[in-house]
Image: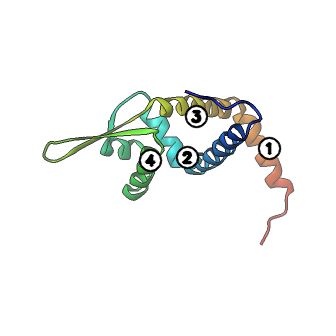
Amino acid sequence: MVTAQAGSPAAQDDIMRAGTLAREIFSDVANKWALLIIETLGDETRRFSELRDALEGISHKMLTQNLRMMERNGLVERTVHPVVPPRVEYRLTGPGRGLRATVDLMCEWTRQNMDHIEAARDEFDETTPRQG
């Protein structure tokens, strides 16, 4: 495999491609449902109905859309078992598990800063005039 030298046009193309892809991925997974799906799947394989039941408030349509987006991006693997009725299972791929580690860090950051965030919000809400 040939790699591009730093500063070469090929290396610049790789950087631009990576930036574009990063923006697309961030746009796709930076929604509450995708992050919750990643967290809920964890290291397990789950059926669609198990995921839906575990994700309180998600609609069938929203779960389907997010799972398809995640499958397209290589974060989730979908397995259809040829039984009647069909059994469909989902699990995180290697890159999906890698993203889960980042999601776990975000959750831990939230837990560590929860009191500060809530106090800041309360102060802001008390001192900032309402719009509209």
Closer to the observer: label 2 or label 1? Answer: 2
Q: What numbered label is drawn on residue 29?
A: 2
Give the class, few, some or many, for how many residues have Cα within 10 Å of label 4's Cα (few <14, many ≥20).
Answer: few
- Quick one: label 2 or label 3, which is nearer the N terminus? 2
Q: Residue furthest left?
A: 84
- Give the Cα distance between marks 4 and 3: 19 Å
Taking the image as shown, residue 129 lies to the left or right of residue 65, namely: right
Badge 2: how crowded within 10 Å, few (<14), some, or many (20+)? many
Which amino acid, by three-letter code, is at mark 2? Val
**Front-most of residues 96 and 104:** 96
Q: Residue beneath label 1, please?
A: 120
Q: CA distance from mark 3 to mark 1?
A: 23 Å
What residue do we see at 57% from left, 50% from top?
Answer: 31
Residue at disc 1, secondary structure: helix
The residues bearing labels 2 and 3 have C-alpha atoms spaced at a distance of 10 Å
Please report whichever mark, 4 or 1, sits nearer to the chain's N-terminal start. Answer: 4
Task: Judge depth for marks 4 and 3 and give the one in front.
Answer: 4
Q: Residue at x 70, y 37 (%)?
A: 11
Q: Amino acid at mark 4?
A: Arg
**The residue positioned farthest toward the right in the image shown:** 127
Q: Residues within 10 Å of mark 1 (few under 14, many from 20)?
A: few
